[in-house]
Amino acid sequence: MVKLPDFDTMMQLHREDPEALERLRQDLTSELVNNASEETKRRLEGLQFRINMELRRAGNPTARFLKLSGMMQDAFSELNYCLNSPLDAIAEKQKSQSAVILPLFGKTAGQTLPSKH
């Protein structure tokens, strides 16, 4: 199990060896995801992918901080809404998940479109 170093050690890594700090972050994250239950693992992998993409897109540490901080604020706001208005949150989620399936253009029941091969 990878152990999180104390704050001073992490600050020293940040100043002197940022690549080592990044490796530590990746190792700790991988360990957390790998130790999660199967039902949680997929969601954590998706979230970590999104976080990694945002970190790559941000140009500097300040932009990274602001982006991740905004993501956490959005998640907290959504959680707060769900806890304070659970019935409204459920209704909105169901509404956003419904889809209208349109028939394929030019196709009627039992008919297939000609192949273009």
Image (spheres, rainbow, N blue to C red):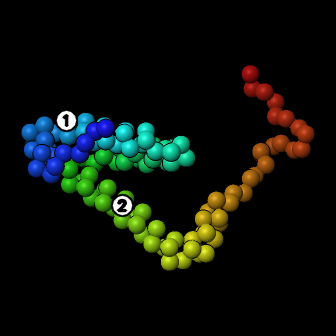
Helix, strand or loop at disc 2? helix
Residue at x 30% of width, y 60% of height: 69
Residue 83, image x and y in percent? 50, 73
Q: Residue 105: percent from the left, percent from the top? A: 77, 45
Find the residue positioned furthest to the bottom: 84
User: In the depicted view, which residue is nearer to us: 47 or 96?
Assistant: 47
Outermost residue, right direction? 110
Residue displayed at 20% across by 50% down: 61
Q: Give the amino acid type for the residue marked by disc 1 in the picture.
A: Glu
Residue type marked 2:
Met
Residue 79 lies, with reference to residue 1, above or below; the image says below
40 in relation to 30, above or below: below
Picture coordinates of residue 103, whole percent (x, y): 79, 49
Residue 57 seen by the camera: no
Q: Quadrant of residue 63?
A: bottom left
Instruction: Give the side of residue 107 with respect to residue 47, left or right.
Output: right
Q: Position of residue 6 (x, y in %)?
A: 16, 49
Q: Which residue is mark 2?
A: 72
Q: Residue at x 89, y 44 (%)?
A: 109
Q: Pointer 2 and pointer 1: residues touching (CB < 8 Å)?
A: no
- Placement of the N terminus among the 4 image quadrants: top left
Q: Nearer the viewer, residue 82 or 67?
A: 82
Residue on which the image places disc 1: 19
Could you tell me how far apart the alpha carbons at marks 2 and 1 are, in whole angstroms?
24 Å
Q: Quadrant of the C terminus?
A: top right
Circle 1: is it few (<14), some (14-19), or many (20+) Cα within 10 Å? Answer: few
Q: Residue at x 50, y 77 (%)?
A: 84
The total of numbered circles placed on residues is 2
User: Which sits in the foreground, 111 or 94?
Assistant: 94
